[in-house]
Amino acid sequence: MGTLWSQESTPEERLPVEGSRPWAVARRVLTAILILGLLLCFSVLLCYIFQSCGPCPCETSVCLDLRDHYLASGNTSVAPCTDFFGFACGRAKETNNSFQQLATKNKNRLRKILEAQNSWHPGSGEEKAFQFYNSCMDTRAIEAAGTGPLRQVIEELGGWRISGKWTSLNFNRTLRLLMSQYGHFPFFRAYLGPHPASPHTPVIQIDQPEFDVPLKQDQEQKIYAQIFREYLTYLNQLGTLLGGDTSKVQEHSSLSISITSRLFQFLRPLEQRRAQGKLFQMVTINQLKEMAPAIDWLSCLQATFTPMSLSPSQSLVVHDVEYLKNMSQLVEEMLLKQRDFLQSHMILGLVVTLSPALDSQFQEARRKLSQKLRELTEQPPMPARPRWMKCVEETGTFFEPTLAALFVREAFGPSTRSAAMELFTAIRDALITRLRNLPWMNEETKNMAQDKVAQLQVEMGASEWALKPELARQEYNDIQLGPSFLQSVLSCVRSLRARIVQSVLQPCPQHRWKVSPWEVSAYYSVSDHVVVFPAGLLQPPFFHPGYPRAVNFGAAGSIMAHELLHIFYQLLLPGGCPACDTHALQEARLCLKRHYAAFPLPSGTSFNDSLTFLENAADVGGLAIALQAYSKRLLRHRGETVLPSLDLSPQQIFFRSYAQPLPALVTWLPKMPQHRNIDQHLPGHIHGIRARFPFRFCSKNKSWHLASACLLMTCSCYVLCLEVINCTGEKYPEVRKDKREKCQKYFMDTRKGKNQQLVTWWV
């Protein structure tokens, strides 16, 4: 007897079932079809998985616009490994650099805000800002007013002999009016600045005047004379436009030029004062009165800095005492012999200051002067600027609190701000990691440096007051607009000065921004230990939440890293870090100097890094830190995208994005005067050829890589291997076995978190 599972079948059960054979065939066919279908689906799934592992093209409108921008500014016919600048900025001579383009774009955004049809509360800040902009754009009304408004101002000041109507008023009364009511300082500058011993304490500063002519101490005598001749022609035009007698205009203009020339000769260069240890002096108003008695310092300064309460014992910061003494002697001499000419000199200076608010005749005279002066000083001609741009700038100056809130609301929303803060956090973390591995810092200095970075405050987009909607409704009660545009400008000048004084006098727990939110300049404040990135900078093509991460890290990220490195400038100066390894630090300094000196320069020029060393170190270190932060982000986050139709990998896009500020360098170098040292801190941190991208993009192994990068704020000197990012599209170029193994080891160590100094991406 069998078990339950082994019983024998009956004879009936062993008989064949009718139709079983065709069914078996059909079953086998269906099984085969099912298996083939599963294999096909699995293959499709594998293809999808493998394809999705690589970067996908970003097809959004912002990415397509950025792609078009790259194509417009670069030259894809140039091999990047041979001439990266030709590849990235080959067409820069045909367009403005990216910073200039972004600044113009931001102003255009302000223009659209000011020209939008909105209904504002009567008397509100928004309404006055819009009214001021519209009056600036109303050139027909400005032309109709002619010189009438300016003649009225001159009469209020006592007139001048050029027009035959002159009342001999007290010299200091006229000077007091010019300073307090018209913002004109003919003999010296007076402004509020930080106290030398206490940066958060404001103090009145007395400094050298700002001359309207581009004079230099080392200028050739021939050029010096030609500049004054052109300026004399300009002053003659102004006097004639104001109805002055031709002979009197020429006489008074000539003497005004003579006064300016003598004042200029009294100046002492900054380098000379620094060498003598006399950059400034702390004196009281009484002491200054004894040194320069021609000026009634107390009454002039009290009127200018109302509502400050001044006394004869008030302390001042004087930047050039010798100049003020000589200036006072000249004024006393003129008051005794040629008082009327001194009056004409002051009024001519005021006319020059106010000319931008006058009709087209004054504008054309100014344009011709600027053109002539630029030719004499070997500068390229200034491109014509549209009227709307000038009016936007003026409105932004006088109504900044109002426009700041409107600009940030439109251009820097919460999502953009959040993405920018996330980028900054990644850059800051990469810097802290770098600091732990610097060979020339001891442990104590490393800990101090890391704590300093951790305590740093960052302000992104706009200051706190600009983010409060109620500030946009500031009423500007002291501003009276009209009836002429010039009168509106003068009212705004007085209001702005009063607001500046009032804001400085009030205690402020927060950092006072030095730039407007729509500007494109980031900076680090040493006194407040805060780094500022305005909303105007964090815009396309430098930053956008929808960009591939490579773009944001390469452009905005490198700028952020550069500004962060300003924190440690003191450590890099001689004697700035006594506890550091001075030998290792000096080796790094020499490495950086040799690196910059190796680049070819135009004929007749030389490279002097004495004034640009700190910025050069921040440029090089900023790129390395941004690259490290981006590399770490790629390891931890998937889903990177690329720009379509460019055939660039994410790493190549990173470098291409970093090159955005470079066209300024390409357009500037060919226009440099001959036999001139490149030792100035030029706009956009341009310190010399390739200074903003100071690495050789070599053709070795047909790949992009950084060769012999001297990184003071990273490692001393090393080679950052990026050979596998291949220019020709080959994924694995032939490299020496030892180098490949070394790069692989760095790559694996980095993935394990063991090494953050060097990252190699195998793509």
Image (cartoon, helix red, strand yellow):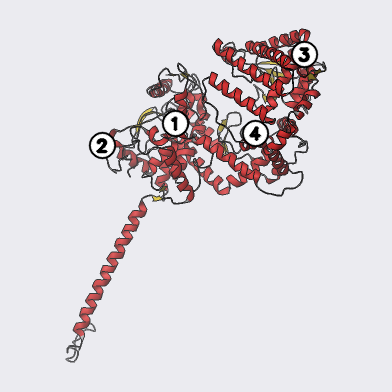
Mark 3 in CB contact with mark 4 (< 8 angstroms) = no
Relative to 91, say whether 278 is above or below: above
Q: Point out the tag, 2 or 1, that comes first from the N-terminus.
A: 1
Residue that appears at 71% across and 24% down: 241
Instruction: Please name the residue that numbered disc 3 is placed on.
Output: 340
Residue that appears at 51% across and 42% down: 540
Q: Point out the tag, 2 or 3, that comes first from the N-terminus.
A: 3
Instruction: Please name the residue that numbered disc 2 is placed on.
Output: 735
Q: Point out the tag, 4 or 1, that comes first from the N-terminus.
A: 4
Instruction: Please name the residue that numbered disc 1 is placed on.
Output: 621
Separation of marks 4 and 1 at Cα, in angstroms: 28 Å
Separation of marks 2 and 4 at Cα, in angstroms: 53 Å
Type of the residue with mark 3: Asp
As drawn, is 544 to the left or to the right of 11? right
Type of the residue with mark 1: Gly
Mark 4 in CB contact with mark 1 (< 8 angstroms) = no
Q: Determine whether the residue tagged by mark 2 lies in a helix, strand or loop.
A: loop
Classify 10 Å Cα crowding around label 3: few (below 14), some (14-19), many (20 and above). Answer: some
Residue 40 pos. (x, y %): 28, 65
